Image (spheres, grey):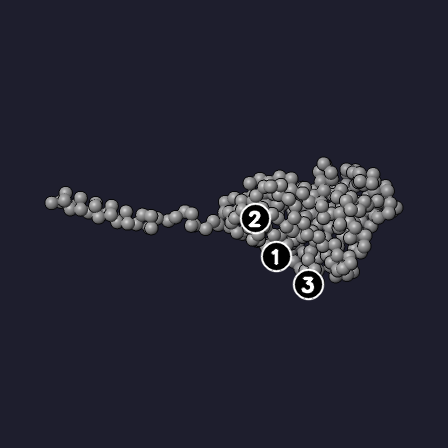
Amino acid sequence: MQNLLSKYTASVALAFISLCTPSCKEDPDTTPALPGQVTLEFDNVVGDAALSLDDQEYTNANGDKFKVSMFKYYISNLIFKKADGTEYKQPESYYLIDESTPNSKLVTIKDIPAGEYTGLTFTIGVDSVRNVSGAQTGALDTANGMFWTWKSGYVFVKLEGTSPQSQNGGLVFHIGGFQKPNNTIRTVSPSLNGNKLLVEGGKNPEVHMKVNVLKMFQGVNTIKFAELATTMGGENSVKVADNYVNMFTVDHIHP
């Protein structure tokens, strides 16, 4: 009798399991992937050489010799794009990249919705709203030396150095301004070279970008230091901004 009951109980259990499968089994395909993060690394270079402050002499497209003592710039308003056209816009995305501060050249963006991203867009500089929003914090803190105290607005790209071709020996390129006709805000979408960013929890794709200083002085405008060695906004800064729109390229990506 006991054996009979055991067989009956086992049969009922098998029938229950059969009814539960697959309806009671969790379908892994329906479990939403967790958000992930992407790290952007900015390698500042001069042509094929790594940028070295103060001690290394370089040559621009006009043949002018120069050294760099300071190089820093803002990137902001990061947007990650999918092939289907949907986007993730990072809120409050303002970053100051400073060659003299190595940690600033690594930017990690967290909490990006999981997915396969095929494009990246960002602004060189600071949008017009934040230029007129008064005192800011973090990367936009005026203590970072990127805010003009003599007029409202941020310096978007700052390069200082020396050149024997400069009339006074110095180079001062403080590029900024957001109002027409001297708007120097530029938005760029460097090619990912056919690669994709697979974002989800537990993964951290790394985008290694090269930022070529020489591009500031060549492109649609060839900058000759004998004629232009100092600019702080205005028409001449627009000439440099029209060049540095091509300053950023993606070198490689670690999945």
Sequence-wise, the earlier of marks 3 and 1 is: 1
Identify the amino acid type marked 2.
Ala
User: Circle 3 is placed at which residue position?
Assistant: 133
Q: Secondary structure at mark 2?
A: loop
Mark 1 surroundings within 10 Å by alpha-carbon count, few (fewer than 14), some (14 through 19), many (20 or more): few
Identify the amino acid type marked 1.
Glu
User: Circle 2 is placed at which residue position?
Assistant: 83
Circle number at residue 92: 1
Of 131 and 139, nearer the camera is 131
The answer to whether marks 2 and 1 mark residues whose Cβ atoms lie closer than 8 Å is no
Of 98 and 132, nearer the camera is 132
Identify the amino acid type marked 3.
Ser
**Image height check: is 140 above or below 255?**
below
Q: Quadrant of residue 207?
A: top right
As drawn, the residue found furthest toward the right would be 167
Is residue 191 at all visible to an observer of this figure?
A: yes
- Percent position of residue 178, x then y: 73, 58
Q: Secondary structure at mark 3?
A: loop
| In the image: residue 218, left or right of residue 25 | right
Sequence-wise, the earlier of marks 2 and 1 is: 2
